[in-house]
Amino acid sequence: MAPSRSLIALLHGPDKPGLVARVAGWIFERGGNILHADQHNDPEAGVFFQRVEWEPRAVAPGQAPGAEAAAFAQFAATLGMAAHVTSAAARPRVALFVSKADHCFHDLALRWRAGEFACDIAAVVSNHPDLAGAARTYGLPFHLVPVTPATKSEAEARILAILREGGAELAVLARYMQVLSADFLKAFGRPVINIHHSFLPAFAGGRPYHQAHERGVKLIGATAHYATAELDDGPIIQQDVVRVTHRHSVEDLVRKGRDLEKMVLAQAVRWHLESRVLAYGRKTVVFD
């Protein structure tokens, strides 16, 4: 199968009449064909959001790669809209961060190997050696970077060098039990997706299943969100829940929670790779 030629744009800005028609008209006038479009209006904030995928006309001889994407971004700016344009054929390079828990790592690696994720895994970074053998089994480069309170800044500098050397465009915290500093997140400057083993904003921080058990909750959940400088407070991408009762032990909650974590994290990563997530402020719009 020939690689897709289509482009995907995520755009947002002040809502005003005619935006959908203007975007469609620009693509049509340049000989493009819209394959899918979805939009959302936030009436309280007065913000318009759109995801549009289209196949541009054939590239003219001598036309620079990315010229159509750049032209669309310039057009969107004339409408007062910010636009991020990617190619559907792109395969972003992803770094997986792990510690000792292996369920999310194996789930992501198996889905990647099965072709579910349109990406290349550039590195597996861990503060423990436990998953080194598993990473080698998948043919993935494993980097052990121990972290202690005294060496945290040096460890993050080393991790940042690994990400830059591997060309990582996305980091996924697959139950990485370290808090990334604000300085690290700023220096990396790329999205970081985290899976939190709780239905945020409830039970943030460590040991959420123990907190949930002590509270006697009837639902437990998992939350995938973008990591920000404030712990467990980034824009939420996906969440799910499962019912529990007073008969379930902490161990039962942990087991059920792990199943949720795998599904929620995989869905969030897939949506991000498909350019379906638009983060703004503390929220996200996730397009169909």
Image (tube, helix red, strand yellow):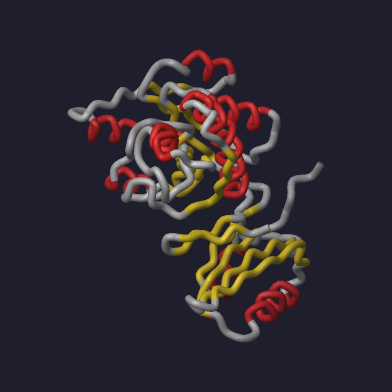
Total numbered badges shown on the rendered structure: 0
In depth, the one of 228 and 68 nearer the eye is 228
Q: Residue furthest left?
A: 150
Q: Residue furthest bottom?
A: 17
Q: Is 126 on the left-hand or right-hand side of 12?
A: left
Q: Quadrant of the C terminus?
A: bottom right
> x%, y% of residue 148?
24, 26
> x%, y% of residue 21?
70, 80
Q: Quadrant of the N terminus?
A: top right
Above or below residue 239? Residue 31 is: below
Q: Residue furthest right?
A: 1
In depth, the one of 283 and 91 nearer the eye is 283
> x%, y% of residue 125?
42, 28
For residue 61, which quarter of the picture? bottom right
> x%, y% of residue 186?
32, 50
Q: Tell me if I can see residue 176 in this picture.
A: yes
Q: Residue furthest top?
A: 133
In depth, the one of 209 and 62 nearer the eye is 209
Residue at 75% from the left image edge and 74% from the top image edge: 28
Above or below residue 72? Residue 111 is: above
Above or below residue 213? Residue 82 is: below
Residue at 68% from the left image edge and 66% from the top image edge: 38
